[in-house]
Structures are given as structure tokens and as C-alpha cells.
Image (cartoon, rainbow, N blue to C red):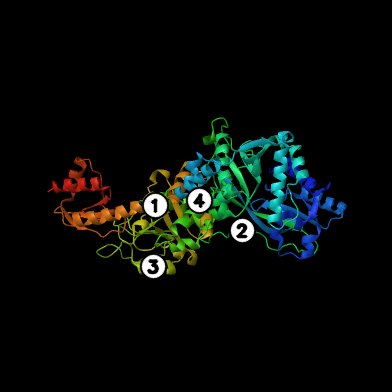
Amino acid sequence: MRRSADVDALQHVLCAALGSRVPVCSIAELGQDAEAFGALDPTARESPTLLGGGAPYLPTTPAPGPQALDALVRRAEALDVPQILVPNVRRSDDTRALRAAGFVPVAADTECVLRLTGEVDELLRARVGADQLRDLRRRHHAVSREVSWERIRLSELDERPWARDAFVELHQRQVERHGGHHNPYNAEALDALAHGVLADRTEMLVRRRQNSVVQAGLITKSHSGRGLYYLTQAIDHDDPVARRNLYVASLYRLYLHARRSGLDWVHLGRGDADRKRRLGADLFVPLDHWLRAPGLAPSEEQEEELALSDFAAPPVTTVPVPGPARFRHRPRFDLIDLSSNTNPFLGAESRYPELDTAELARTYLATLSKWPGNEGLGALSADHLLFTSGAVDGVMLLLAALTSPGESVCVTPPTFELYAHFARVLRLPVVEVPLSGDDLCGLDTERILAADPRVTLLCDPNNPVGTRLDRTQVKDLVARSRGLVVIDEAYVEFSENPSYAELIAQHDNLIVLRTLSKAWGLASARCGIGLAQPGLIDALRRVQVPFGFTNASQHAVRDRLTNSRRVRAGIRHIRTERDRMAAALADHPAVDRVFPSEANFLLVRLHKHERVMDQLRGAGILVADTGHLVPATCRISIGDRRANTTLLDVLSTAL
């Protein structure tokens, strides 16, 4: 419905509804679209306006180019119409020509789409949670016992005058309920649609209780044949079945129909994004109306480009985000994509992964912000977050994007060994400033600052020790460092102490790394999280390989975030087993010391290190030998109770 032929067809329908040869009406006659113009002078709302799109119908209008706008302006002059409106343009479109022609943006509703990435119940469970899915199914089954479900091709509507009359009547009553007067789906408009170029792709959905129509709506298949536009629906609110949320029940039925038909998406129209999110929508596109009117001065505000961080390496400042990732916010679901050189005959797997992960980022931030210690995440937006192929990929990205040859990287041994490894691979000098104290949690802040590194990499909770770093020292380092401070929080969910995410909004030199491989149990999905100010995130995105975050991984992440009760329960079990194992190991004759841990592992110093390690290997038990980092130690991951007990039993035979 975004191609020009479809927009022209909808304009023809609008003309029929208006009883006019041309799409000219007042803004006040546009129904729900008129609400966005409440701040305009009343004269502007009532003046004749030439419409350059399909309003007030749901599909959006592609941003017109200079030639199309010139033609629109000439037409308005020929008709002596003082105002021009290009409605419902995606904010992600190229709108430079509209601005240059004197049009002013007015914020409109959000366009909402549900993408069918799997079986309906499976994907809804991942997006709205098991409880909401059960509610949708319950409503659907309850309604289906009382009302029928019929689909009538619009080109055959003349054979069913009862459906035509009921549709018009319900839509007229709907307009009156909302205090309006103009019905965009009156009899003339419906007839124009039924005899126009969209008729063969459009169906009327009718739900009846016996011979009484209680709901009537329209769906149109996209020109690509891959999706459905849900154009409109009206309900008889006097019927008792309407009180059971007939709209929601019918949407669920429509999802099932679209999936059985092999479609990829359902366009849910414009409206409240939060409500549509609860119904399964996962793509949300902000829209603007563009108005040119006398006395309405063109906005001098240009869309601000994201300011790249000053920490970006010089080569990164001169290159854009690579390839298609540059256009990740421009929806492609309703386009025929002939740009990717893939095999179209082998199903959905032949298409590249979704690049617009803004909604998944919102889900991550909203979910984690409700967890204790993560309150700072609630203040961040999707622009503060980058998904990576695991947290270690985030380390490599930031070193590649934010450092130059000769600039040093500081690490604090004992710590995660890949930090120094990646730095050396990139030919960056490595400065080691060891941790101090019996629990290896003290930072030598002054020594780090004296080294003046470009990047300081901290692991907190620390791997392989398990302790948290001194928080006062970490905050002091972030505040005083001229370079970047990167805090890897791979194990933070196991800790009772808070995340450093709350500091991101205050410091442009802080990057927090998270992962879903540990507490979230998604190691195979390879999902890391980079949190930082948007200018830093943009620098990382410029060196990131596009399409590294697969659709399967995105689906797994969304499902786990939406249904996180099992994760919380798993974390509680791990903490309980960690405490049990720490106590048992502390009393074990083979163990010299158990380090305190706020992670899902324990660092253990052994009396006879080599002998114990050999004994464990011989028993088929694999633990991490960390003796080269902390003498005579091993790192023991917390397994289930049986695995943990088996390890204790084997240790008993080691001496």
C-alpha cells in the first residue's frame, strides 16, 4: 500500500467518500487524523486542503520527491486551494524535499506491525508473555463459540448487499460514537473500493451472531503478496459479545489466518504503540503529517545528526555505518526487495536478519530496569544500546573503533584474559595494573591514571575471582580518567550490588558490557549488550559487521526477556548452590581457601593443585585451571546439585 498506484487508489476512495472529483477537504474532516492538528489555528483546521496521500485510511504515504511535490503544488494552485497536506509519512523516510518545499511536520500516530517469524502462539509467547497469550486465546475461544468468522472478497460484495449495508452502518455508528460527522467508509467509499484496483486484494471480515452482524472490517493483501494491511474495523458495541473484547479476539484469529496463508506480517494500522505491543506488534514506525499552509512558517530545525563521540578513532570518523545497517530504521517489510542477491526460492531463511533491533532493545531495557540494582537502565533509550555477538565481540569492536596505533590499553590482572589478547592482536600496548587486597578487589586508581591509557578494561564481578571491585574506586576512575573506562558486567545478575549503568548518562567515557550467555542461559544465541552514550554506540556500529545478530537469536532473546520468571528462579538456585558449595569447599581438606563470589562460580585455592586437577580430569570433571593467573587455584562453575555433589565426592579422594 506504499506504492503510488495503491495511494492513488485510496485517494479515489477518499474522493468518493467526500463526493468530490478531487481530494480536497478540511483537516477537521479527517477523523482521527485531525486530532494531531489540535494546536493549529482554527482557520487552518477549517480551510480547504489538498491531500497528497491516502488519509484518512491507514497505510502510510511515501515521502514525495521534488518532482512529485512540484506537481502537487501546481495542482493546489490550479484548484485555488490554500493548503496542502501529505499525511502519515514515515519519519525514517527522506523528507528533505518536503522541508525544502515549505512543508512543516506535525507529529502523528505510530505505525504498528506484527511480523510473523514463527507459529503464532510461539511468537506471541515470546513477545507478550505466557500470561497475555493465555488471555488472547481465551478471548478468541470464547468469542468463536458465539459468532462466526467470514471473509468476503470485495470484488464479490455486490452479491452480498447485507454485508455492505452492515459495514456502512457500523462505521457510521462508530463515527458518531466518537463525536465525528464524516464517515470515510460510507456507501460511496465502499463501492469505490469494491470496484477499484484494490478489490481483488481486499476482503471484508464479518462476524455474525446468527443473522446479526456484530463486527465488520477490511483487510488488504500487500502488492508483494507477503503481508496483510488491517484497514478498518467497526463493532456493534450494543451487542454483549463486544464486551469480551471482540477486537482482540478477531486480531488473534487474523494472525492465525495470515500464518496459515504463508504470510510474513500483519499491518495493524496506526495508534497506541503500547496497546499494539501487548497484542504482539514488534515493529513501530513514528509518523508525521506534513502541512504547507499560509502563515505556517517552515521549521528551521533540521533533523539533528547523531554527534559522534570524540573517542572515535580518526579513521572511524570519516566512514558511515556500513552497508544496509545504515538504513536499519527504514522499514522494509512492505517492499519487494531485489537488492540483496539471495535465493528467493528457499524460504524465510534466505533473507538477511532484521537490522532494526530498537524494539528488542526497548524490551531489554524495560525488563532489566525492573530488576534490583538495574534502575539506571530505565533512563536509557534504544540509542544507548548495541547488540553484539557476545560480550567478547563488544570488546573487539570497541578496541577497533575507539583506539589508534600506539594508544595503550590497561587491564587489571587477574582478569579475563581475552582483554589483553584482543589488544595485542590489534597491536596496542598493554599496561597491567594488578588488583590488590586479600579478595583481589582493590584498584590502584592512581597508577592507572598515571599510565593515561586510552581504554581501561574492568571486569566486575571479576572473572576469575568472583568478587566485586571497590565501587568508590571505580566511580573515581570513571570521573577522573581522560580515556575510556569499560566495565564488563557479564555476571552482574548474580550479584547483590548494583550495575554501573546508572552512570552512563553522566559520563561520555563509560561503556558497560552485558551478556545473555550467563544468567540468561543463552550462550548459544551469542547475544552481548553494549551500553554507552549514543555517540559511542554510533562509533561501534561503524565497525560492526552487519547481520551478525541472527533472527533466530533475536527470537530467543525476546522470548527469554518476555518470559523471565525461569531466569530469576535459576539465579536464585545458583546463588543457593553457590553458598552451599562455598561452605562445603571451605571445610574440605583439599581446599586452602574459597574466595568470596558474587558470580556463578567460585575461585578455589588448592593445597595440592596439580594432583587435584589431575584427579578431577580423571573423573571426567572439567573445571578452569586458573593457576597461571592466581597461583594454585581453579575456577569452579556452579552446576546443578548432582554435578556439584559429584565434584565434592571426587575431591574427597584427591588427598
Tell me, yes or no, whether the two marked residues, 2 and 1, touch with CB atoms within 8 Å. no
Nearer the N terminus, badge 3 or badge 4? 4
The residue carrying mark 1 is 565
Residue 406 visible in rendering: no
Label 3 Cα crowd, 10 Å radius (few <14 / some 14-19 / many 20+): few
Label 4 Cα crowd, 10 Å radius (few <14 / some 14-19 / many 20+): many
Gap between marks 2 and 3 measured at Cα: 36 Å
The residue carrying mark 2 is 305
**Could you tell me residue 481's position as x and y percent?**
43, 67
Gap between marks 2 and 1 measured at Cα: 39 Å
Nearer the N terminus, badge 2 or badge 1? 2
Question: Is 38 or 546 nearer to us in this picture?
Answer: 38
The residue carrying mark 3 is 450
Label 2 Cα crowd, 10 Å radius (few <14 / some 14-19 / many 20+): few
Question: Mark number for residue 483?
Answer: none
Nearer the N terminus, badge 2 or badge 3? 2
Nearer the observer: mark 4 or 2; the answer is 4
Secondary element type, mark 2: loop
The residue carrying mark 4 is 360
Instruction: Residue type at mark 3: give it.
Output: Ala
Secondary element type, mark 4: helix
Work out which residue is located at the far left of the displayed protein and give it.
655
Nearer the N terminus, badge 4 or badge 1? 4
